[in-house]
Image: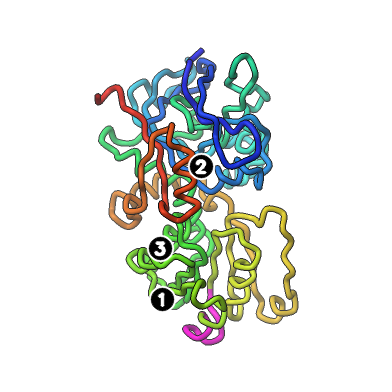
Amino acid sequence: MVTMTAAIAMQPGDRFDVAEVELDEPRDDEVLVRILAVGICHTDINALNQRLPVPLPMILGHEGAGVVERVGSLVTSVQPGDRVVIAPDFCGKCTQCRLGHTAYCERSGVLVFGGTRLDGSTKASRDGVPVRAGFFGQSSFAEFSLVTERNIIKVDDDAPLQHLAALTCGVNAGAGAVLNTLKPEPSHSMAIFGVGTVGLAAIAAAKMRGTRTIIAIDRFDSRLELAREFGATHVINTSATPDAVAEITAIVPGGVDRAFDSTGSKDVILQAIYSLGYHGVFGYVTGTGGVPLDLDLNRILTKGVTIRGIMGGDGTGLVFLRELVRHFEDGRLPIDRLVKTYRLDQINDALEDMKSGVTIKPVLVFDDPKRA
């Protein structure tokens, strides 16, 4: 067993318990990773407060990066000392995985949201009580994580893990939605609602595709200033002008070709859908937490609008993550400008800073014993 400190979601709420737990040694097909950096994502917040109803107690965290500590006997792609970035796990055997749609793995209820191995075992315990330690196949709000070869990629020894960690979910979701699914053309216009990490990644991706008009919508001026730097051609502050649809159609008469939402807010989602022009496509990456939408179906029908849910950036396994790393290295995804680092014992402070808008992308960092 490995004794480690972890941030545990013990019960629904807005705070983690930081405590000592016991983690299993790696099985034959598993990799023990010493976590050096892990991003905090809104999905973690949604799981903690049970807007995303995962079983508790659970160690959350799903944007981990670190160094391989030990490997099981069947592991061949990495060895102790390798620097790795951890992605969401997938089974690799179901129909969706075989088709390359690993973000839609049919076993994600267990491997991603259930927090266990496929056989139902929990990986960790606290004072003899089982603790789920497989959130997204990693549970990386901890000093160590047990993963598989399926959901890690090796990176350079000098790679900035505190920045690369942020690529695996938030940046993946925003950039992937644009590059893999919505695919705006240079002649298109696009409205992006919510410009935190996900939205800013979407803006950067739209810029990569040469999109003519990129409209950023948010309620924080500081984020809208960043949106311009990431590639937005227009910005709308909904605190000053709550009718975003009217503002958008003033910029693009008839409506935009693509709209994207990262907020999960019912009212914002409706504005995004109604901002579309003929044959427009709306993409979203998070639900409303069970709050129903009162959609005007006639309005959607008469414009031929498409509504598309997008999981995991519609990427395939680790292939798209490697592309994101290249985009970051080439300067097209300047995620390092969004990151503020915290220690594990500051995780609850980081959550508050994230929710208040003080910090766009909090990343927990750990001491690297090999570089002390």
Q: Looking at numbered disc 2 in the image, what kind of residue is underneath it?
A: Gly
> Where residue 93 appears, x then y in whole percent?
62, 35
Residue range in magenta is: 248-257
- Answer whether labels 1 and 3 touch (C-beta < 8 Å): no
Q: Is residue 304 above or below residue 198?
A: below
Q: Is residue 176 above or below residue 365?
A: below
Which residue lies under the disc numbered 1?
234
- Mark number for residue 220? none
Which residue is pictured at 66% across the width and 80% down the height? 303
- Mark number for residue 223? 3
Which residue is pictured at 32% across the width and 53% down the height? 337
Q: Looking at numbered disc 1 in the image, what kind of residue is underneath it?
A: His
The answer to which image quadrant residue 229 occupies is bottom left
Q: Residues within 10 Å of mark 3 (few under 14, many from 20)?
A: many
Q: Is residue 296 above or below residue 180?
A: below
> Where residue 51 appears, x then y in whole percent?
66, 47
Which residue lies under the disc numbered 2?
317
